Image (tube, grey):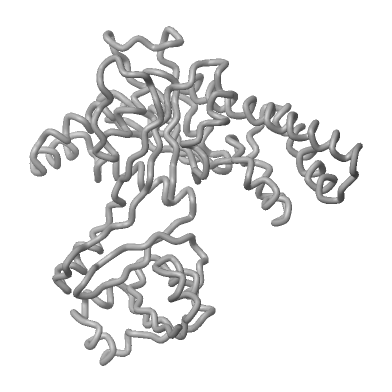
Amino acid sequence: MKVGIIGLPCSGKSTLFQLLTGAAAPAPGSRPEARVGVARVPDSRVDALAELYHPKKKTPATVEYVDVPGVTKGEGSALVDLPALRGVDAFVHVVRAFESATVPHPEGAVDSLRDATILELELILADLGTVQRRRERLEASIKKANRAEDVAERAVFLKLEPVLEAGRPLRQLVPSLSEDERKRLRSYSLLSEKPIVLVVNMGEDELRDAAGFLAGAGLAELASAPGLALCPVSAPIEAEMARLSPEDARAFREDLHLDEPGLDRVIRASYALLGLLSFLTAGEDECRAWTIRQGTKAPQAAGVIHSDIERGFIRAEVVTFADLVAAGSIAACREKGTLRLEGKDYVVRDGDVINFRFNV
């Protein structure tokens, strides 16, 4: 999974990126540029399997995050041709909700709903320019050659243009398009088509009553639209907790009534928004979590590990994580009847521990 981190300047998005990925802060005075880092998906099940198998290594699932320079009002088109954003599955839009005497807001005052709306409009306008230019080129090509392929593609763009002109993001339209129409759009990486996790970067006071703040600011209602998710976090507090011992960090979170680190919530929100889940493999060499989309069948899940396993798929030996841990071993699961043999039509579930049988 690849996620782009976007936001207005001074929103705290680069701080969030550094906390998620462990990347170092850029050198003072350096030129702003896109940065790529990898975050581990928190999953206690991998640790539990490692305690059972004592593998040579354990590997959690990962998310690749791309931090791009802050987008100022009127400059959303700068995101269109950024190579680092090609192929992203979603955006994390960091919205500022904290006050700071030392970090002035570029719009003069903190207003989270306004900022969320500003950047959404920038994505829409950037897409409108892309769609109009492509539609004009298609029409010129149709006048010369009238190819059926160009006519079909223009029909799709003619559906997109009025939606964007009305100030609506494409993520509201795309689910109603046919599979063929969606395929025609994939190479264009349209920005407002991407799902968005609105990460609201709060101060300590706002975080203590995050739900009340989000409702009062109008962000909860905004995030009720399709393809949006909401995740309150405080990058300054997360940075402070990162310097504490695990015990002190846990006590700090409890004082703020937080069940888990904010960074874990960001990753989980990204997973949930994209409809992702993890299945597990376990053995003496490695215990590992693998990311797939909900609804993935066993052969395609095998292909995430290696294309040869998908090509030569025979059966999948499947046991739930809970059953494996309760029994203590695969052999014990086999005796209890909790280990199942599944075929090509089996839909993999979150937490399945799988051994694939294959022959190539």
Most extreme residue toward the front is 144
136, above or below 11, in the image: below
Most extreme residue toward the bottom is 335
Q: Position of residue 117 (x, y in %)?
A: 54, 24
Counting the numbered discs, the total is 0
Which residue is located at x 53 percent, y 16 percent?
A: 73
Which residue is located at x 32 percent, y 68 percent?
A: 280
254, above or below 329, in the image: above
Lateral position of residue 276 relative to residue 57, left or right:
right
Q: Position of residue 258 (x, y in %)?
A: 24, 40
Q: Position of residue 225 (x, y in %)?
A: 57, 39
Q: Nearer the viewer, residue 55 or 211?
A: 55
Q: Nearer the viewer, residue 199 or 21?
A: 21
Q: Position of residue 37 (x, y in %)?
A: 33, 40
Lateral position of residue 322 relative to residue 4, left or right:
left
Q: Quadrant of the C terminus?
A: bottom left
Indicate the quadrant where residue 283 lies: bottom left
315, above or below 239, in the image: below
Which residue is located at x 68 percent, y 50 percent?
A: 182
Indicate the quadrant where residue 120 lies: top right
Which residue is located at x 25 percent, y 45 percent?
A: 260
305, above or below 200, in the image: below
